[in-house]
Amino acid sequence: MSVKQISVFLENKPGELNALTGVLADHSIDMRALSLSETNEFGIARIIVDRPLDTATLLKDAGYVCTVTSVLAVDIPHVPGGLNQVLNILSEAKINLEYGYAFLGGRKDSAYMVFRVADNAAATAVLRSKGIRVAEEGELESL
């Protein structure tokens, strides 16, 4: 399964991320995860929120350029080598990772790693066949 991530394009200047998070706060949208990347001209804030489709509509109405993407949220055991185990499985299955970022999910024994891959269903099937838990649609919104 996959979860919804919103990629928001921001000008690369002071205050832009503050303005974005202000819009979310003003509308009682709870951010679960955030990843930032940048180029010289713009930045990309990748966010996972409690109401992704409502949030995307709200952000577009507020003048932001954003897209909704399906990504994997993989439950990584909080032990030495936990991430390596997952990466070995994906590597052996020849599944390429376009990007990834981590966040804590509220349990002390694990964290989530968000992965963008070409085929979410194939990656999910491979991981689950090896006993790795992948978050279900809507699961992260209820954290």
Image (cartoon, rainbow, N blue to C red):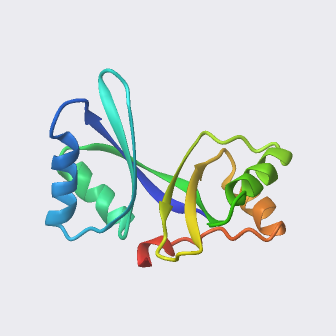
**110 to the left or right of 91:** left
Residues 72 and 61: in front is 72
Q: Quadrant of the N terminus?
A: bottom right
Q: Is residue 51 left or right of residue 122?
A: left
Quarter of the image for residue 89 reads bottom right
Q: Is residue 15 above or below residue 77?
A: above
Q: Residue at x 81, y 42 (%)?
A: 94
Q: Is residue 7 left or right of residue 80?
A: left
Give the residue drawn at x 61%, y 39%: 98
Q: Find residue 125 and report its horizontal and vertical position in percent.
A: 78, 63
Is residue 60 toward the left or the right of residue 131 in the image? left
Q: Which residue is rendered at x = 24% and y = 52% of the image?
A: 59
Q: Nearer the viewer, residue 20 or 57?
A: 20
Q: Find residue 21 and report its horizontal and vertical position in percent.
A: 22, 55
Q: Residue furthest top?
A: 40
Q: Image height check: is 138 above or below 113?
A: below
Image coordinates of residue 99 in percent, x first then y, are 57, 41
Q: How many marks?
A: 0
Outermost residue to the front: 80
Determine the image quadrant of residue 8. Answer: top left
Whole-percent x, y for residue 77 in the image = 66, 68
Residue displayed at 77% across by 68% down? 128
Q: State which quarter of the image contains the C terminus.
A: bottom left
Q: Answer above or below: position of 93 versus 130.
A: above
Residue nearest the viewer, comparing 132 with 5: 132
